[in-house]
Amino acid sequence: MSCYDTFTSYSLRAIGYGERLLPKSDITLCEQFVLIGSGMIWNVYFAVFAMVSGFGLATLVALGKASDNRWAAIPAKAFIFLFRGSPLFIQFFLAYEIFILIPKAGIDINLGFAVITAETRWLTKAWLGAVIVLFLNTSAYSGEIFYGALRAIPKGDVEAANAFGMSGFKKFRRIIWPTMLRLAWPSYTNEAIFMFHATALVFFSGFPAWQQSGDALYYASYFADKTFNPFVSYPIIAIYFVLFTLLIITLFGWINRRLNRHITPEKRIKLRFKPQFIR
Amino acid sequence: MEMCSDPSSIEGINWWMCYMSTGKHQAFYASFGTVLALLVLTVPVVMVLGFSGAMARKSAIAPLRWFGLAYTNLVRGVPDIIFFLFVPIAMDQGIEYLRHKIKCPEVLEPIRQGNDFVVCTIAKMPLGSSAQWVHEVYGFMLALFAFSIVFGAFAANTLYGAMNAVPHNQLETGAAFGMSPRQVFWRIQVKQMWIYALPGLSNLWMILIKATPLLFLLGVEDIVYWARELGGAKTNRFAYPHPDWRLYYFAFLLVFYLFMTWMSEKVFTRISKRLSHGQAMAGAQS
């Protein structure tokens, strides 16, 4: 089978299209590259959905933690402590155990005028369950980053906004939020990188792979098992991760430039790749 | 205990006491020791590797500098989990390969035969005839090694940054006093860098704590292993039948980790206060 054939039959294998049977013997380098790359679709999916949905919650959590209102501050602090203080690995396990306890048939929610049924049977599948865990986890980490940025907003900016008669939501949308994002962006970039790396953990999270459609690590370890040779498949997945890491840095670098476009070049915050945490 | 001899006849508080003191539960409690042992044993190795890595990056010899740069950067671009999968197998095969070459050079067949990795019997590591505990210790050592390599790279980054963060004036002052570059490095730069390294190192410690459940993936019988083992549903064939309790066991692990984090945070705040004593800087910043 030529490499082109391999590509057509396996490139979408991870999402259930193409050849059903995985290669079992005489595994070629091409097959390893294509299948592991196909698995990366899932890693990208997990990271993108968790980051996009986590962004909103992170902002809320950061505002909550910075709030003077105890009823907002305490839950926000607890949420951040819970998800930053425990290993993501344990969070995955715990969430999976909770999800399988929820009745599969769905929960009827009575709204008084109508009854809606919440679909729960998908929670034990990685595409929803793992995303929920990653979403909560990244919200906590980003929330802490945003909180730090909120506290670093120059007082003068806020006073200027007050002097202009801005208040409440308008001040937040025009002054506080953009400044917070600008200040937080370098750290948030690192968070995005680590979020992406953390998607590799989904493979071990207890959420089962269905019909051998798994993430990149699923295929990498499949090949390492089949060939008993870790020196090929793991470097391949490492190459993929390095490439995507560079892609994230580029994308976030563009946004960083846009966020800093009104600042004189000397005062801009440089994007430095300085990852500080794993989960 | 005597009252535990017939678990089916007891109930209430006694059942719980007996249940919590079974042999397997004692292994579960002991596995917390495994986790703590890993933490205690990894830290010195990580510090040595990190310091060597940082020094390699600052080295005047180019190949050594490149090695330092590659080592510190590779681990940052690739998920740690992949290293945890890769390093132990690679180490294991490397050791067996070397032993095979040394112990039985008369065997000429290639070691990699298709999909198999074949070494002669006496080159196996550990030997097939070794006791169970040797296998366990060997597995633990491989895990320790994997942890040290990954976290050594992170520590190298932190220490390198900290070395550069020491105000240049201080180093120049040292030189002006007639100190040699080596003396400046050891007596000023290394002595002053700790306050700059502390935030990074404390972060690293937190990460290390939170990475310990990965021991389970390396085949070590750690707390996650026992939580799964004990929490799984037990039918009536077992002495202490119970439904699926994994949720509670994992919740317990969660509390354990939260407690560890909380404790560490307190300790680090204290150290930071002490180290920044007399330093002309606002708090500790890396």
Image (cartoon, coloured by chain):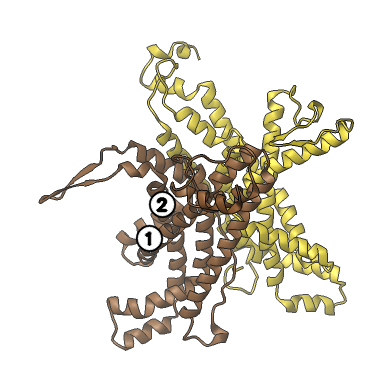
The amino acid beneath tag 1 is Ser
Seen in the picture, residue A124 relative to B262 is either above or below; the reply is: above
Residue A69 vs residue A152: left or right?
Answer: left
Neighbours of disc 1 within 10 Å: few (<14), some (14-19), many (20+)? some
- At 33% from the left and 67% from the top, the residue drawn is A68
Chain letter of disc 2 in the image: A
The amino acid beneath tag 2 is Val
Mark 1 element type: helix
Disc 2 marks which residue? Answer: A131
Instruction: Pinpoint residue B238: horizontal percent, then vertical percent.
Output: 44, 17
Q: Earlier in the sequence, mark 1 or mark 2?
A: 1
Disc 1 marks which residue? Answer: A53
Determine contact: label 1, label 2, CB under 8 Å: yes
- At 66% from the left and 45% from the top, the residue drawn is B86
Relative depth, front residue between A224 and A189: A224
Mark 2 element type: helix
Q: Which chain is yellow?
A: B
Seen in the picture, residue A173 relative to A241 is either above or below; the reply is: below
What numbered label is drawn on residue A31?
none
Q: Which chain is brown?
A: A
